[in-house]
Image (cartoon, grey):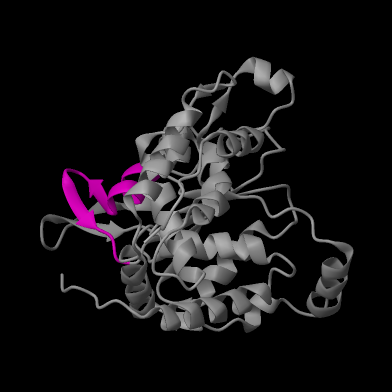
Amino acid sequence: MAQVPAAGLGELHDAARRIAANVERVLVGKPDVIRIALVTLLAEGHLLVEDVPGVGKTSLAKALARSIDCTVSRVQFTPDLLPSDVTGVSIYNRQTGEFEFRPGPVFANIVVGDEINRASPKTQSALLECMEEHQVTVDTSTYSLGAPFMVIATQNPIEMEGTYALPEAQRDRFTARVSIGYPDQQAELAMVDEHSGHNPLADLTPVSDGETMQRLIETVRGVHIAPEVRRYAVDVVSATRQVPEIRLGASPRATLHLVRAARAQAALSGRDYVVPDDLHTVAVPVLAHRLVLTTEAHAARRSATDVVRAVLHRVPVPQGSAR
């Protein structure tokens, strides 16, 4: 595959501004959530949107997908969904006497998985190889996925009946998790005024394309991160494994995702180098969903977000230039 030329920070900032404005037409009053979604996209990661019903989880996923002119597929996860319904299946062709592979919906640039925790663990596991290795193995044959490739999954953390909690291995493959939350009264009033008559998703048109996104991703890969900042990222993730309130800390994969997300955050801020504040901005979305708290922590009403913030407060921040 030919090397994709990197874009400049100016082009990246302009493209990100257009995409964010496009998504905000659908998801009103949530710029921080949209920014994390963009960070995840530019960091070549996957996004888990977890919140109560009716706050715009699926709308965020669809709006981001429609803002980029590339292949998009949507999978409604249900208990009877099979792994082959996601990855594809080999079908025997009587005319040729050979098996032919029929690609599933995962063969798209952006895959929207709605209510991912309603599918069985067997079906959820069909995404493990896709998300980590950008490939699919069916009947001993391996098929590469296109680039860019991003999974945006939604789930409801409140309604547990008929759902299967995502295992640690699945959650660890999501670069970031966001919770949209309820809008403030002004934003909700604006939403009622603008959205009650029609669906804004129907009017959404692409403002970027897959080729441009690949150039922007190459730009993010080239963002400099100094040895001191790299060490700080490792120290923060390592500290999560030593907190008494945590039964399972963040993995080395989490360190890689934290650094990639910090690079994307720096690029969106107009810098070609990472500073500790970039790590602070993305630490909670990147790390909190990977932590498994102890029973005592749950009893004390401590959340993973609280623990990550305490770790950031405790680990010394490197001093000096980030260049």
* Image-based side of 261 in relation to 198, left or right: left
Kindly identify the residue that appears in the image at 50 percent across and 44 percent down: 317
Of residues 30 and 308, the one drawn nearer to the viewer in this rendering: 308
* Image-based side of 192 in relation to 135, left or right: right
- Where in the figure is residue 176, as x and y percent of width and height? 51, 49
Of residues 111 and 268, the one drawn nearer to the viewer in this rendering: 268
* Image-based side of 322 in relation to 288, left or right: left
- Where in the figure is residue 209, as x and y percent of width and height? 41, 80
Q: Is residue 84 magenta?
A: no
- Where in the figure is residue 43, as x and y percent of width and height? 40, 60
Q: Using the rendered image of the protein, determine whether residue 308 is visible from the camera's viewpoint.
A: yes
Kindly identify the residue that appears in the image at 74 percent across and 57 percent down: 55
Question: Which segment did they paint magenta?
Answer: 127-147
**Outermost residue toward the top in this view:** 296
Q: Using the rendered image of the protein, determine whether residue 76 is visible from the camera's viewpoint.
A: no
**Outermost residue toward the left in this view:** 97
- Where in the figure is residue 244, as x and y percent of width and height? 56, 18
Q: Is residue 131 magenta?
A: yes
Q: What quarter of the picture does the C terminus occupy?
A: bottom left
Kindly identify the residue that appears in the image at 46 percent across and 64 percent down: 266
Look at the picture and state if 71 lies above or below 233: below
Look at the picture and state if 169 lies above or below 15: above
Of residues 18 and 147, the one drawn nearer to the viewer in this rendering: 18
Question: How many discs mark residues in the rendered view?
Answer: 0
Quadrant of the image occupied by residue 180: bottom right
* Image-based side of 205 in relation to 299, left or right: left
Quadrant of the image occupied by residue 4: bottom left
Kindly identify the residue that appears in the image at 44 percent across and 39 percent down: 172
Q: What quarter of the picture does the N terminus occupy?
A: bottom left
Quadrant of the image occupied by residue 190: bottom right
